[in-house]
Amino acid sequence: MKFMEMTPTDMVHVEQIDNQHIRLADDLNSIYDSVMACDKKKTFQLLNEFIEHLEEHFATEEKMMKEHRFPGYISHKLEHDRFYNQILKTAEKYGKDKEAFGSEQLKRIKVWFFNHIEINDKKCGEYFVERGVS
Ligand SMILES: [Fe+2]
Ligand SMILES: [Fe+2]
């Protein structure tokens, strides 16, 4: 079994958002494999790629929320900002050997990821679909 498994129930039914979520889950699977192989250099590189994709993804959702005047924009963006800053710090410290990065951290990211889809992204996905975005 893969570390991250995206199922049809994890879809928000907006193609661009779903595709980005799938890419982020794929990134985390690669990071997991690299952690298991104890390849620190590769893990750090993949972690930074994940962060880049995350930034792009959050920007996509935030742009759509603003364009369609989604009422929960501020709290949703705050969730993004909080998580993004946290992971950025973690990666920086890991790069400087000041903090470990392994399965514990990955598990926490996984929990956040699926919770965020369930609680935040599905709500705005539904709102976008109602407005004809697909
Ligand atoms: Fe989101
Ligand atoms: Fe998302």
Image (spheres, helix red, strand yellow):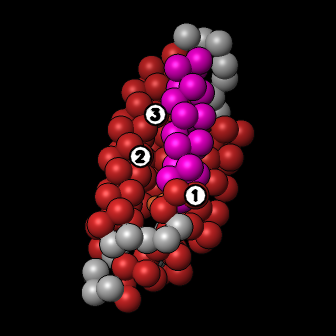
Secondary structure under the numbered disc 1 in the rendered image: helix
Residue 115 appears in which quarter of the rendering? bottom right
Secondary structure under the numbered disc 3 in the rendered image: helix
- At 45% from the left edge and 20% from the top edge, which residue is drawn? 41
Query: In the visual, does 40 lie left or right of 131?
Result: right
**Residue 48 spot, x, y in % from top left:** 41, 31
Whichever of callouts 2 and 1 sits on the residue coming sooner in the sequence is 2
Query: In the visual, does 117 lie left or right of 99?
Result: left
**Residue 107 spot, x, y in % from top left:** 67, 48
Residue 120 appears in which quarter of the rendering? bottom right
Q: Could you say which disc has been placed on residue 54 in the image? A: 2
Question: Where is mark 3, residue-wise?
Answer: 47
Whichever of callouts 2 and 3 sits on the residue coming sooner in the sequence is 3
Disc 1 residue type (three-letter) = Ser
Circles 1 and 3: CB distance less than 8 Å?
no
Residue 76 versus residue 33 in the image, above or below: below
- SS assignment for the magenta stretch, majority: helix
Q: CA distance from mark 2 to mark 1?
A: 18 Å
Q: How many numbered marks appear?
A: 3
Q: Could you say which disc has been placed on residue 75 in the image? A: 1
* The magenta stretch spans residue 86: yes
**Residue 101 spot, x, y in % from top left:** 63, 28
Magenta-highlighted residues: 76-94
